[in-house]
Amino acid sequence: MLTLERAKELLNTTTTEEHLFLHAKNVSVAMGGLAKHFGEDEQHWMAIGYLHDYDYEQHPQEHLQHTEQPLLAAGLTDHEVRAILAHGYGHCNDVQPVTNLEKALFTVDELTGIIQAAARMRPMGITDMEVSSFMKKFKDKKFAAKCDREVICKGCEMLGMEVKEVAAICIEAMKAYAEELQLAPKGSA
């Protein structure tokens, strides 16, 4: 089973850009929160979340087309690789998310971008962020405009949850890692 330590080793072989590592951490932490919600293995879901953009830096125009074989060769299971591939459903491939793990990754990849952007605008970062303030930013299509709200809504629908429910779980999970995610109160580092 993929561990977070192994996921970090593997991502280090393909990625150098700090913002991609930060994105990996955000998605990883949010995945841990959703794993807890669904009664699943938090560390395993965090590892999958951390590694989800394995080929992105090297192949941004062919994202996820250079993922399957290297990760299988690195010892990941078919199930783990499929979860990573499924986050590209509809925009990179046609691997439809079917398990809660796959649906969660599909959803939080975009969702964490908006949470992160919203938290960065706040004096206390994510530490005092409520889901209501997130929802205001979510509804403003100009805010964090590159984050695909349709994907987020589709993913939440797949999970059988409202956007605000999923966002609340992710925000709470991310609060515990505020420093590491660079979302702590300004001037506190």
Image (cartoon, grey):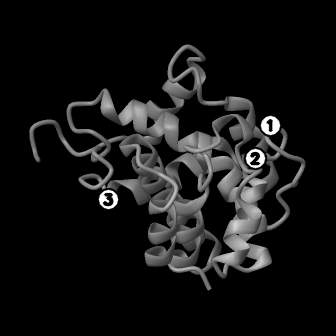
Which mark is nearer the camera, 2 or 3? 2
Q: Amino acid at mark 2?
A: Gly
Q: Residue visible at 9% across and 38% down?
A: 187
> Residue 91 shows which numbered tag?
1
Q: Residue visible at 27% across and 39% down?
A: 125
Measured from the top left, where is residue 74 in percent x and y?
A: 63, 77
Measured from the top left, where is residue 14 in percent x and y?
A: 52, 56
Q: Amino acid at mark 3?
A: Tyr
Residue highlighted by disc 3: 177
Q: Quadrant of the N terminus?
A: bottom right
Is residue 130 or residue 62 the one in the foreground?
62
Measured from the top left, where is residue 127 in percent x and y?
A: 27, 47
Number of other residues with Cα within 10 Å of mark 3, as a class: few under 14, some 14 to 19, many 20 or more = some
Pointers 2 and 1 in contact (CB under 8 A)?
yes
Number of other residues with Cα within 10 Å of mark 1, as a class: few under 14, some 14 to 19, many 20 or more = few
Residue highlighted by disc 2: 88
Is residue 116 or residue 138 the one in the foreground?
116
Residue ranking furthest to the top: 142
Q: Amino acid at mark 1?
A: His
Give the SS element for disc 1. Answer: loop
Give the SS element for disc 3. Answer: loop
Quadrant of the rendered structure where residue 102 is? bottom right
Q: Residue visible at 24% across and 53% down?
A: 179
